[in-house]
């Protein structure tokens, strides 16, 4: 692919200096496209538009065109039609959402358990939109539960949706820079208490949560899927280690299960 690009560019720019300059510009454009802000991507699209017009102006007659200006007007009109037809797709290229999922000890909260007026530690996560376009109808699903001590009934919560903090079960919009907290499970203040994962399959808030008790001590890996109407579904893994003490809840990175 690189050699083919080099061959095409070398035919347009015969000098090695010109070839290197064009390749460097293409590399910078690619870097700015994936790492830059929307204004950078817009500038790249405008430069590409102008580049096509310039090439058609100088190289059109060599390809059998009538004259430079007629070729330029024809190409510019064609590009304008393409932009009008694919305007929504172009906007998607310029502005796109990107999610970041985080689960940590600083998100643990102490409050009444979801099924009894007993204090428990809520294990929670946070999903943030770090892109520059809103995520439509964002929702999270607990796909898999893995570990040495996973109980046989773990399948009850697998493929279930995780609720948002406060018991909200609707799909949510995530604006750029906005975040939402979601519930993973609870652990009561007892010695060797289990971590109770909670998920739901029914959106009605009055419907009971489906639970699964992960015994302590143990190390578990949860696979969480992120969905949205305008994003590609992705999977993230979260590792949780629970000890004998109720407060001993850790989230070790890259720890084998």
Image (cartoon, rainbow, N blue to C red):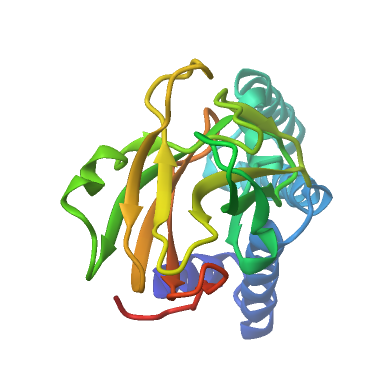
Do we see residue 71 in this rendering? no
Residue 17: percent from left, percent from top: 68, 84
Q: Nearer the viewer, residue 43 or 234?
A: 234
Direction left: furthest residue: 152
**In the picture, residue 32 is in which quadrant?**
bottom right
171 vs 92, nearest the viewer:
171
Q: Is residue 217 left or right of residue 226?
A: left
Left/right of residue 77 with respect to residue 221 in the rendered view: right
Return the residue nearer the eye: 128 or 70.
128
- Count of residue discs: 0
Q: Residue at x 64, y 59 (%)?
A: 108
Q: Point out residue 193 in the picture as x, y percentages from the top left corner.
A: 42, 62
The picture quadrant where one finds residue 20 is bottom right
- Residue 168 in the image: above or below residue 49: above
Residue visible at 62% across and 76% down in the picture: 19
The reply, left or right, for residue 230 in relation to residue 149 is right
Q: Say which residue appears at 52% left-offset and 67% top-offset.
A: 246
The C terminus lies in which quarter of the figure?
A: bottom left
- Where is the N terminus found, in terms of image quarters? bottom left
Q: What is the residue that sits farthest to the right in this orientation?
A: 39
Residue 231 seen from this side: yes
Q: Where does residue 38 sit, x and y in percent of width and height? A: 78, 47
Which residue is depicted at the point 37% across and 25% down? 201
157 relative to 147, above or below: above
Quarter of the rendering containing residue 117: top right
Seen in the picture, residue 4 relative to 214 is either above or below; the reply is below
Q: Does residue 122 lie above or below 83 as drawn? A: below
Percent from the top left, x then y, of residue 143? 33, 46
């Amino acid at each position: 692919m690189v050699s083919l690009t080099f061959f095409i560019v070398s035919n347009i720019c015969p000098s090695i200096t010109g070839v290197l300059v064009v390749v460097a510009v293409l590399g910078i454009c690619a870097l700015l496209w994936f790492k830059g802000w929307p204004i950078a991507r817009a500038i790249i699209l405008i430069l590409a538009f102008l580049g096509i017009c310039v090439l058609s102006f100088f190289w059109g007659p060599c390809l059998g065109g009538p004259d430079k200006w007629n070729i330029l007007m024809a190409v510019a009109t064609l590009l304008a039609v393409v932009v009008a037809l694919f305007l929504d797709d172009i906007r998607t290229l310029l502005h796109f959402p990107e999610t970041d999922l985080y689960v940590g000890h600083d998100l643990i909260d102490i409050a009444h358990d979801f099924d009894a007026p007993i204090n428990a530690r809520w294990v929670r996560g946070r999903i943030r939109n770090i892109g520059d376009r809103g995520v439509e109808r964002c929702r999270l699903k607990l796909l898999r539960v893995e570990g040495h001590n996973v109980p046989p009934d773990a399948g009850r919560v697998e493929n279930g949706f995780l609720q948002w903090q406060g018991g909200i079960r609707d799909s949510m919009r995530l604006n750029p820079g906005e975040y939402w907290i979601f519930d993973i499970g609870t652990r009561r203040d007892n010695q060797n208490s289990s971590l109770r994962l909670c998920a739901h399959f029914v959106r009605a808030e009055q419907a009971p949560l489906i639970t699964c008790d992960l015994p302590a001590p143990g190390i578990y890996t949860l696979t969480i899927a992120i969905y949205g109407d305008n994003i590609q579904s992705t999977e993230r893994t979260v590792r949780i280690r629970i000890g004998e003490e109720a407060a001993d809840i850790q989230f070790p990175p890259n720890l084998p299960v």
